[in-house]
Image (cartoon, rainbow, N blue to C red):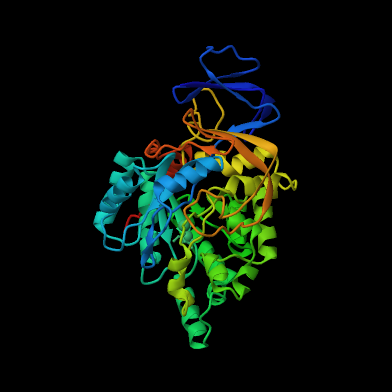
């Protein structure tokens, strides 16, 4: 199977130039003007369009068992929907229940993800601590291509990691050359505020953002960053939603600490007014954590992306349909947390970022693909238009338009948080390892065609930090 993409403009995180791109056996094999290729090659006419690395969504939760139910989107339907939106890889999460061996959970998620239509990897959550957890972390890094471990600082009485888990896990991360990542919300404060709100009779979805104000996120982000500083481990803050946590990242980065930040397409364009709707289903459909924030916080996030203090965008694609959200009809703390976005992230980031001048096309590629590949050590296999890279490519029509709607999206959920938004800039062709899986509205995703992407530890960053950790070790003062 070989494909040549002709007449387009290649846009990478670094460059913009006219060239054809020739793909064979799943790889990019040639890039250049007026390429000579075998006559058998399928031709994609990219005249007036951009040829970019396929999106990498570093934060999804396909078919996640959570809050008494299971996310409605599975690994096949979710990765297929992503392909329709120009997204060609995901990094999902293995989330062991407390006391569940990490290896057992990992095997379960590997089974579930076999059906993926696009390539996928995992972050593994550390939800409890023991010598067995420590050993499983080492096994996962050594034998299974895991190089990042997640810590939920929220969700008390469920998967919350307290400081003891953070400190022990972070120490193991730096020894293994793995990135520590956190969901930064103070779970104790959320729990307390939830109790107070319910006691005041506030049971509707409007209580959700009130129980998780920005300060609750900012405290946790700063605490996680400071613990990472002491433990000398690189740290990645997922779904940064507000200025409070962004300020903690910005401060640390300005002092040279290795901190990375992710923001969600939804948090960049949707605000907290959604929770004040009288329509329970509408408001509950937007219940996710951290919650959607005010426009001031949205503006801060855009500045974070523009200023380089936020490096990636994601979706936290975690789908629950109306009947599932109804579990919290009389108690907002029971509404399963999560929203969708994998099919729309690229178009939202183009329309709200590039079309408004906030992001250059090169910055768009960086924050939707290349930076995630670099941070999680799969660049340039992924996230690049380069000879030898996987042929994960999106051909992008900057003039094309689409009105986003649950009525037409491929996502397996009955709601779309971007409903009715008309975007300019759409994918016309998506290639997944050289296979044309989406063409002008025709989704040709193949169940099980996706491959598990192993990620090496000890990228240059970690080798230096692991060495530094050795150097920093306090030297015992001889007695006497
Ligand atoms: O917290 C997460 O990232 C998962 C459980 C998805 N739900 C959410 O509200 N973000
Ligand atoms: Zn989270
Ligand atoms: Zn998440």
Asked if residue 320 lies left or right of residue 305, the reply is left
Asked if residue 480 lies left or right of residue 323, the reply is left
Q: For residue 246, what is the image quadrant? A: bottom right
User: Where 307 sits versus 294, above or below?
Assistant: above
Front one among 172 and 162? 162
Q: Position of residue 157 (x, y in %)?
A: 36, 72
Residue located farthest toward the bottom when viewing the structure as drawn: 200
Say which residue appears at 57% left-offset and 68% top-offset.
282
Q: For residue 355, what is the image quadrant? A: top right
Say which residue appears at 47% left-offset and 65% top-offset.
337
Q: Position of residue 39 (x, y in %)?
A: 54, 12
Q: Visible in this render: residue 354?
A: yes
Q: Position of residue 356 (x, y in %)?
A: 75, 48
Asked if residue 256 lies left or right of residue 147, the reply is right
Front one among 312 and 470? 312
Say which residue appears at 46% left-offset and 68% top-offset.
325
Front one among 4 and 469? 4
Q: Visible in this render: residue 469?
A: no
Q: Position of residue 453 (x, y in %)?
A: 40, 38
User: Where 344 sits versus 440, above or below?
Assistant: below
Quarter the N terminus occupies: top left
């Amino acid at each position: 199977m070989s494909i040549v993409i002709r007449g387009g403009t290649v846009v990478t995180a670094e460059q913009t130039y006219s060239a054809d791109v020739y793909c064979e056996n799943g790889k990019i094999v040639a890039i250049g003007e007026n390429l000579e290729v075998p006559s058998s090659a399928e031709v994609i006419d990219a005249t007036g369009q951009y040829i970019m690395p396929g999106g990498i969504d570093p934060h999804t939760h396909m078919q996640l068992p959570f809050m008494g139910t299971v996310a409605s989107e599975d690994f096949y339907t979710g990765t297929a929907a992503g392909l329709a939106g120009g997204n060609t890889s995901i990094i999902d999460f293995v989330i062991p229940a407390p006391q569940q061996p990490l290896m057992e959970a990992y095997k379960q998620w590997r089974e579930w993800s076999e059906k993926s239509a696009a390539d996928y990897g995992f972050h593994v959550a550390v939800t409890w601590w023991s010598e067995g957890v420590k050993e499983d972390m080492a096994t996962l890094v050594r034998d299974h291509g895991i190089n990042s471990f997640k810590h939920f600082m929220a969700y008390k009485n469920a998967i919350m990691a307290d400081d003891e888990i953070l400190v022990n896990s972070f120490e193991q991360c730096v020894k293994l050359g793995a990135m520590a990542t956190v969901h930064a919300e103070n779970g104790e404060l959320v729990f307390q505020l939830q109790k107070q709100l319910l006691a005041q009779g506030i049971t509707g979805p409007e209580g959700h953002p009130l129980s998780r104000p920005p300060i609750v996120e900012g405290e946790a982000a700063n605490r996680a960053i400071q613990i990472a500083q002491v433990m000398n481990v690189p740290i990645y803050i997922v779904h940064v939603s507000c200025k409070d946590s962004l300020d903690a990242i910005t401060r640390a980065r300005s002092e040279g600490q290795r901190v990375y930040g992710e923001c969600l397409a939804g948090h960049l364009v949707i605000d907290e007014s959604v929770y004040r709707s009288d329509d329970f289903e509408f408001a509950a459909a937007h219940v996710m954590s951290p919650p959607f924030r005010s426009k001031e916080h949205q503006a801060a996030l855009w500045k974070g992306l523009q200023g380089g203090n936020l490096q990636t965008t994601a979706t936290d694609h975690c789908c629950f349909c109306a009947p599932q959200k109804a579990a919290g009809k009389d108690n907002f703390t029971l509404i399963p947390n999560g929203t969708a976005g994998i099919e729309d992230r690229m178009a939202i980031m183009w329309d709200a970022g590039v079309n408004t001048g906030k992001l250059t096309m090169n910055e768009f590629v960086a924050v939707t693909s290349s930076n995630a590949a670099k941070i999680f050590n799969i660049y340039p296999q992924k996230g690049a238009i380069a000879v030898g890279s996987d042929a994960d490519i999106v051909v992008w029509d900057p003039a094309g338009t689409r009105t986003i709607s649950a009525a037409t999206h491929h996502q397996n959920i009955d709601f779309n948080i971007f409903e009715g938004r008309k975007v300019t800039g759409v994918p016309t062709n998506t290639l997944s390892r050289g296979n044309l899986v989406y063409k002008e509205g025709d989704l040709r995703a193949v169940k099980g065609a996706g491959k598990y992407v192993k990620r090496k530890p000890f990228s240059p960053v970690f080798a230096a930090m692991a060495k530094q950790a050795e150097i920093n070790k306090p030297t015992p003062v001889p007695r006497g």
